[in-house]
């Protein structure tokens, strides 16, 4: 926003203040993560001083996380659960998004609103019902229980994003294929899907991040260390006694699971923003 | 568009295709969302427990509100509740099936009437002060954190919307807290706010702002403040990005015209920008409110989970899993759902009224 000439003198001061605010914002958003990295490199009593950089950085905590805690297993579990959830969601969502984004039919809006509603309703409201379902399917304390239950939030998310994207593709694309006598399935597979890579990446990333970060279901539907995912593992890291939490290890584990996410966010930030705001802006 | 086309055979074929394509997704949603939700509401009307071997029965709305003897006074063998009459000092058996009192030792029916007010009390979710405390905690947390996120998010969105060098970098920076798992952010902040060795206390002590170390997450008031601070840190980016997307859809011409007319930026914001982004803003507020009302991780991880520091979801899970009382836990979960639905309805209503009122 530009100011009229009369304000020009004030503008310089304004500029400075503006950049101070921006700098403050950067510190506010990044410092906690920076502090986790610094803390994870400290061991022993050095952990408790507040210098901004460790005197003698050490990777001991990173080694300890893998040797003293069942952390490697947790990372593998999380990767399997988040990966499988993402793939299942995308596979199921593409068809639904085709119907909702490209076909005009009665009830379309109701279905869209229902799906949006499912994505927003409190997870606790389905916890005891899901628990019963999972025990009935004999999935309790397995990764399958998590993949199944995570669909409750990843599926609406992916359907919503892919629908917004499909609705934006021009009509003519399909019409040409329709003239050639191609059915809807062929049109989806041959014409639309090849164009959908960016949307699939955005939806897949958001689903993956949501599944990777989930805590309540993972805490409730798994019981043993060999089935636990990263968030639960980090929450349950414990030391020799309840009073000696191994903070160095907790910070190291936090850094390990966050770095891939931060990398994903930095590489795909445009896609992620597009995905996050899909539908929300159009209403 | 045209109703005639909706009724034709072509439209019917189109609708058939649409439902066919939708079927797998709808089936999955019925399985993982619809059925469990119905099942939770049903369980809230029973006395189900997690312990094996317990035969659940239908108890109506007893898990919500019930006037009678304490639930833990139930005696399976006697087929009734043990109650102690303070007024007469007599040990009694109350049988719900006959709604009458008997002598606990002999089992004989009592001759005189029993003062029910002396032996009965209100039980269930709605009579539980711990539940109401967790509702108050959650609502306070929701209102304060969503308001702060809205204000801060709007400020950040406006900053990002202005053309400044390094905008991409800043946008990436604000996305980082959003991508960090909630569990990890809880641990990061738990570490920074640690009363003995945390950096926050150390810095505040050095600056002379506090006289002694504060146990941030031990006292309900400071714990709520800490939880709000973490949530604001984590979710303001989401708010900012939604609002930024809305700002970017606004036509530039309005601003050009306003600049030529010398309209003051604050006035421009209040009269033009804000009303135009209001729909998107309401959507963001509804999303964030629902997300805040179902909060679990932050309360569960950052506090000691004492009775006065629960969120609604934490209360419900505690009843369900730790106390194994699935009926009571499901009642609380159903109440959370009802509160979230009511909040949505309220916000949608406000969102509808507000823009009209301004015109």
Image (cartoon, coloured by chain):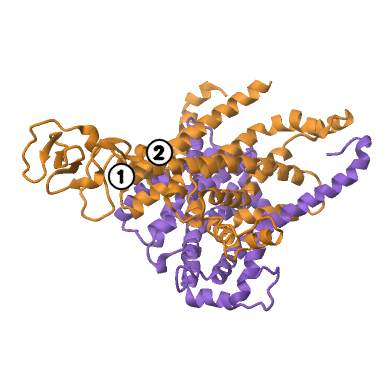
Chain colours: A purple, B orange
Instruction: Answer with left or right where residue B283 lies relative to residue A133.
Output: right
Up the image or down, B264 lies above or below A118; here it is above
For mark 1, give the secondary structure. Answer: helix
Q: Residue at 48% of width from left, 76% of height from top?
A: A68
Whether residue B122 is visible, yes or no, is: yes
Q: Which x, y percent locates residue B93?
A: 14, 41
Q: Residue at 64% of width from left, 21% of height from top?
A: B357
- In terms of depth relative to the viewer, which is nearer, A134 or A67? A67
- In terms of depth relative to the viewer, which is nearer, A42 or A96? A42
Crowding near the residue tagged with mark 1, few <14, some 14–19, many ≥20 C-alpha atoms within 10 Å? many
Instruction: Answer with left or right where residue A160 lies relative to residue A50.
Output: left
Q: Quadrant of the N terminus of chain B?
A: top right
Disc marking residue B335: 2
Up the image or down, B117 lies above or below A69; here it is above
Q: Residue at 48% of width from left, 40% of height from top?
A: B136
Say whether disc 2 or disc 1 marks the residue closer to the N-terminus.
Answer: 1
Q: Quadrant of the C terminus of chain B?
A: top right
- In terms of depth relative to the viewer, which is nearer, B348 or A99? B348
Q: Which x, y percent locates residue A131?
A: 35, 52
Up the image or down, A31 lies above or below A176; here it is below
Q: Quadrant of residue A43?
A: bottom right
Instruction: Calculate the distance from the C-alpha at mark 2 to the C-alpha at mark 1.
Output: 12 Å
Q: Which x, y percent locates residue B294?
A: 48, 45
Q: Quadrant of residue B169?
A: bottom right
Crowding near the residue tagged with mark 2, few <14, some 14–19, many ≥20 C-alpha atoms within 10 Å? many
Disc marking residue B327: 1
Q: Is there a contact, CB below 8 Å, between mark 2 and mark 1?
A: no
The chain to which mark 1 is attached is B
Q: Which x, y percent locates residue B159?
A: 76, 45
């Amino acid at each position: 926003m530009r100011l009229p000439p009369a304000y020009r003198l004030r503008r310089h001061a304004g500029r400075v203040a503006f950049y101070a605010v921006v700098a403050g914002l950067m510190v506010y958003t990044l410092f906690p993560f920076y502090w986790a990295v610094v803390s994870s490199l400290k061991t022993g009593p050095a952990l408790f001083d507040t210098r901004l950089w460790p005197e003698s950085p050490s990777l001991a905590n990173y080694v300890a996380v893998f040797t003293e805690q069942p952390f490697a297993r947790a990372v593998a579990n999380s990767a399997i659960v988040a990966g499988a959830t993402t793939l299942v969601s995308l596979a199921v969502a593409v068809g639904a998004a085709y119907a909702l984004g490209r076909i005009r039919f009665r009830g379309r809006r109701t279905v869209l609103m229902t799906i949006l509603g499912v994505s927003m309703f409190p997870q606790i409201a389905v916890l005891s019902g899901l628990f019963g379902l999972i025990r009935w399917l004999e999935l309790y304390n397995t990764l399958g229980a998590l993949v199944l239950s995570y669909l409750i939030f990843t599926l609406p998310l992916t359907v919503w994003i892919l629908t917004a994207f499909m609705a934006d593709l021009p009509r003519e694309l399909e019409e040409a294929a329709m003239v050639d006598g191609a059915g809807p399935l062929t049109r989806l597979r041959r014409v639309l899907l090849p164009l959908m890579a960016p949307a699939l990446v955005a939806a897949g990333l958001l689903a993956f991040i949501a599944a990777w970060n989930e805590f309540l279901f993972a805490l409730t539907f798994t019981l043993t260390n060999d089935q636990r995912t990263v968030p639960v593992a980090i929450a349950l890291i414990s030391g020799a006694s309840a009073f000696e939490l191994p903070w160095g290890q907790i910070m190291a584990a936090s850094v390990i699971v966050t770095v891939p996410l931060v990398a994903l966010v930095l590489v795909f930030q445009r896609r992620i923003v597009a995905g996050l705001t899909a539908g929300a802006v159009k209403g | 568009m045209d109703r005639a086309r909706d009724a034709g055979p072509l439209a019917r074929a189109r609708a058939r295709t649409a439902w066919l394509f939708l079927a797998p997704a709808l089936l999955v949603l019925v399985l993982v969302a619809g059925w469990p939700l119905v099942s939770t509401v049903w369980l809230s009307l029973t006395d189900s427990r997690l312990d094996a071997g317990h035969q659940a029965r239908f108890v109506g709305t007893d898990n919500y509100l019930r006037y009678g003897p304490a639930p833990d006074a139930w005696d399976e063998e006697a087929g009734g509740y043990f109650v102690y009459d303070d007024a007469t000092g007599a040990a009694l058996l109350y049988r719900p099936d006959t709604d009458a009192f008997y002598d606990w030792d002999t089992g004989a029916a009592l001759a005189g009437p029993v003062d029910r007010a002396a032996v009965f009390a209100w039980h269930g979710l709605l009579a539980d002060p711990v539940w109401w405390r967790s509702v108050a905690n959650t609502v306070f947390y929701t209102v304060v954190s969503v308001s702060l996120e809205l204000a801060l998010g709007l400020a950040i969105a406006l900053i990002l919307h202005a053309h400044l060098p390094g905008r991409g970098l800043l946008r990436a920076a604000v996305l980082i807290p959003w991508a960090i798992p909630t569990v990890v952010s809880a641990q990061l902040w738990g570490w920074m706010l640690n009363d003995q060795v945390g950096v926050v206390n150390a810095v505040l002590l050095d600056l002379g702002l506090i006289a002694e170390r504060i146990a941030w997450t031990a006292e309900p008031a400071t714990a709520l403040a800490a939880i709000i601070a973490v949530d604001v840190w984590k979710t303001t980016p989401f708010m900012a990005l939604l609002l930024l997307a809305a700002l970017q859809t606004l036509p530039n011409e309005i601003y050009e015209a306003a600049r030529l007319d010398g309209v003051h930026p604050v006035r421009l914001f209040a009269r033009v920008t804000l009303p135009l982004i209001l729909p998107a803003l309401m959507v963001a507020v509804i999303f964030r409110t629902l997300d805040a009302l179902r909060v679990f991780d932050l309360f569960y991880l950052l506090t000691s989970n004492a009775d006065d520091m629960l969120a609604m979801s934490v209360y419900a899970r505690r009843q369900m899993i730790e106390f194994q009382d699935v009926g009571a836990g499901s009642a609380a979960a159903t109440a959370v759902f009802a509160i979230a639905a009511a909040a949505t309805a309220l916000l949608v209503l406000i969102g509808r009224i507000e823009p009209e009122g301004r015109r």
